[in-house]
Amino acid sequence: MRQRYHIEVEWDEEGYLVAHVPELRAHTQARSFAELLERLQEAIAVSLDTEEEVSVLGFSGDLEIEAA
């Protein structure tokens, strides 16, 4: 059975995108969103100890903007 997981994504102080999957205690980082998605698939597969394909179904999230 396929599971869905909540993923938290934020920028760190060095300019990397950092992703956390709290339910799996998995995390990864990357310079681009496309690279982050690839690394997330790998991190989730390792956490689940599976060789099955992990696929990204879509994206939704909050965006914070700071203006002077």
Image (spheres, rainbow, N blue to C red):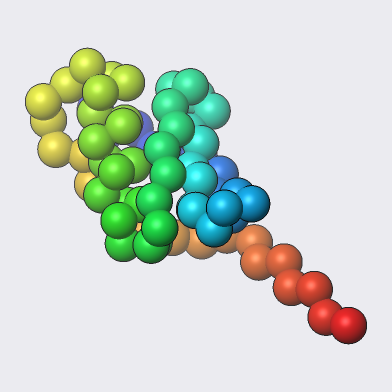
Q: Is residue 3 left or right of residue 24?
A: left
Up-down relation of residue 63 to residue 28 (above or below): below
Q: Position of residue 53 (x, y in %)?
A: 14, 38
Could you tell me if residue 64 is visible in this image?
Answer: yes
At 49% from the left edge and 53% from the top edge, which residue is drawn? 17
* Residue drawn at point x = 42 percent, y = 44 percent: 29
Image position, residue 7 (x, y; %): 50, 42
The residue located at (51%, 36%) in the rendering is: 20
Image quarter hosting the C terminus: bottom right
> Is residue 57 something that shows in the picture?
no
Q: Quadrant of residue 35?
A: bottom left
Kindly give the residue lying farthest to the right in the view shown. Answer: 68
Q: Is residue 63 above or below residue 16?
A: below
- Please state which of residues 12 and 3 is positioned toward the viewer in this rendering: 12
View extreme (left): residue:
51
In the picture shown, does residue 63 fall above or below 48? below
Q: Is residue 54 above or below residue 52?
A: below
Instruction: Please tell me which residue lies in front, 65 or 13.
Output: 13
Residue shown at the point (31%, 62%) measured from the top left:
34
User: How many numbered markers are drawn?
Assistant: 0
Q: Based on the displayed image, in which of its 4 quarters is residue 52 positioned?
A: top left
Looking at the image, which residue sits at the far bottom?
A: 68
User: Does residue 48 appear to the left or right of 59 in the view shown?
Assistant: left
Q: Position of residue 30 (x, y in %)?
A: 39, 51
* Side of 44 relative to 18 (left or right): left
* Image quadrant containing the N terminus: top left
Picture coordinates of residue 27 (x, y %)? 44, 32
Residue 45 falls left or right of residue 9? left
